[in-house]
Image (tube, grey):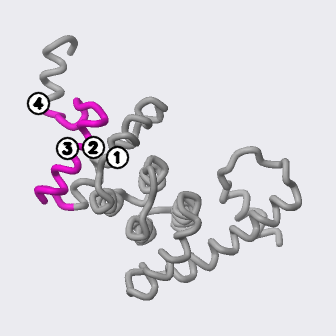
Amino acid sequence: MSGKGGKKWLERYMPFVARSPEMQVEWLTQALRKGVLTSAEITPYVRLLLESEEPEIKSRVSEALRELTPAMIEQLLEAADIYDTPKLLALLPQCTLGQLMAALRKEAPPYEQKPRLVRDRLFYAVYSRAPELFARAVAGLQTQGLAPPGFAGAHARFLELLEDEKLLSALYPKAKAKDEIDLKDLEALRSLL
């Protein structure tokens, strides 16, 4: 399929994919506003929106997200799965307490082989995005009874990983040039201690 015929076919049968990133964000917000799709039905569309690793596309998606209200962004975060939530958080201009709480409520699917690692990555993405709101979001989930099962233990473990990271940074200040934690390395270190 090439030329006009291919584009028309794509628009007819895969309208979301045929749109620009800005129009994809608009399509998602309209679907959320109208309530024509459930949050679970929107999840694959959020994944498609976030799948590109090209900096230009990411920038365009980020710009389009900037136009949304905080409530709409919170709905998108609720619709995103645990794997896509860190990507979505990274594209947001700023985060609210409600958005962080929506992100932290995510659970790994039952088929996930390493649910602790997936949750650790989610915690780190939320913490990195808004460290000043992280503790308040955790406290809000716990006091409102919205925390998923095993949340308190996962949070305590994550705080220990942060302490390990601080210790490693103090011992080896030039060892890691990037800002991203490698949770697998910290888990390996923890098993040695």
N-terminal of the pair, mark 4 or mark 1, is: 4
Upstream in the sequence, badge 4 or badge 3?
4
Horizontal arrangement in the rendering, residue 97 relative to residue 115 (left or right): left
- Direction from residue 57 to residue 168 in the image, left or right: right
Residues packed near mark 3 inside 10 Å, few (<14), some (14 to 19) or many (20 plus)? some
Q: Nearer the viewer, residue 74 or 110?
A: 74
Please name the residue that numbered disc 4 is placed on.
12
Closer to the chain start, of discs 2 and 1, is 2
Which callout, 4 or 1, points to the residue nearer the camera? 1
The N terminus, quarter of image: top left
Marks 2 and 1, Cα distance to the nearest angstrom? Answer: 7 Å
Residue at horizontal 34 percent and vertical 46 percent from the top: 65
Query: Which amino acid is tagged 1?
Result: Leu
Using the numbered discs, state the Cα–Cα distance from disc 2 to disc 3 in whole angstroms.
5 Å
What residue do we see at 21% from left, 37% from top? 16
Q: Which mark is residue 27?
A: 3
Tell me the amino acid under the disc marked 4: Arg
Name the residue that disc number 2 marks.
Answer: 25
Where is residue 47? Give x, y as percent.
35, 47
Of badges 1 and 3, the one in the foreground is 1
* CB-based contact (under 8 Å), mark 4 and mark 3: no
Which residue appears at 54% of the width and 58% of the height? 129
Write the start and end of the magenta stretch as one range.
Answer: 12-38
- Is residue 150 within the magenta segment? no
Contact check, label 2 and label 3, Cβ < 8 Å? yes
**SS of the residue at dot 1?**
helix
Left or right side of 27 for 103? right
9 is higher (above) or lower (below) than 136: above
Provide the residue designation for mark 1. Answer: 65
Q: Residues within 10 Å of mark 2 (few under 14, many from 20)?
A: many
Please provide percent x and percent y for residue 50. 39, 43
